[in-house]
């Protein structure tokens, strides 16, 4: 009976270890790349997350366009749901001359994968830490 309890406890720990809890996206560096799937552009991307409350994250994205043009923008991502150990996020941001972008993302403690869409741009953000 004791070995069953230990096995059950270890199983619960393994399944909850990667679950995103409030505040778990902030801290640490996120890095990866962005890709404009409709235009063929891509580049490096970094992000810093800051928890506002249990339902909102402030995110600063920095990267490069055309390998040399730096960009930086801030957005608030809303926690819109959970799927097992993943958190589902959505938000919008106005980016300089490119207009308003909408974001839909899925994240766990180690990976952040988002799609973005604007009037002329569609693509992905793929980050890890």
Image (spheres, grey):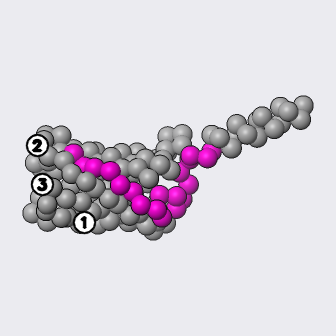
Q: Which mark is residue 39?
A: 2
- The x, y position of residue 85, in whole percent, is 54, 43
Q: Nearer the viewer, residue 116 or 68?
A: 68
Q: Is residue 105 visible?
A: no
Residue drawn at (29%, 66%), measured in percent from left and top?
74
The answer to which image quadrant residue 3 occupies is: top right
Tell which residue pokes out farthest to the right in this image.
1
- The x, y position of residue 37, in whole percent, is 18, 40
The answer to which image quadrant residue 35 occupies is: top left
Going from N to C along the chain, the mark reached first, 3 or 2, is: 2
Going from N to C along the chain, the mark reached first, 2 or 1, is: 2
Left or right of residue 39: residue 33: right
Residue 80 colored in magenta in the image: no
Residue drawn at (25%, 66%), measured in percent from left and top?
73
Question: In the rendered structure, which segment of residues is drawn in magenta?
Answer: 16-35
Left or right of residue 4: residue 82: left
Residue drawn at (43%, 67%), measured in percent from left and top?
50
Q: Which mark is residue 66?
A: 3
Going from N to C along the chain, the mark reached first, 1 or 3, is: 3
Q: CA distance from mark 1 to mark 3?
A: 17 Å
Q: Which residue is mark 1?
A: 73
Residue drawn at (18%, 64%), measured in percent from left and top?
70
Q: Secondary structure at mark 3?
A: loop
Q: Secondary structure at mark 1?
A: strand
**Above-or-below relation of 78 to 96:** above
């Amino acid at each position: 009976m004791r070995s069953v309890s230990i096995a059950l406890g270890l199983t619960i720990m393994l399944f909850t270890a990667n679950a995103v809890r409030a505040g778990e996206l902030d801290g640490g560096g996120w890095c990866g790349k962005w890709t404009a799937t409709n235009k063929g552009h891509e580049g490096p991307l970094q992000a810093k997350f800051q928890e506002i409350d249990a339902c909102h994250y402030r995110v600063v994205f920095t990267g490069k366009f055309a390998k040399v043009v730096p960009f930086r923008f801030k957005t608030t991502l809303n926690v819109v749901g959970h799927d097992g150990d993943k958190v589902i996020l959505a938000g919008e941001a106005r980016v300089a001359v490119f207009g308003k972008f909408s974001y839909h993302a899925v994240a766990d403690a180690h990976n952040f994968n988002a799609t973005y869409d604007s009037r002329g741009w569609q693509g992905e953000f793929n980050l890890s830490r």
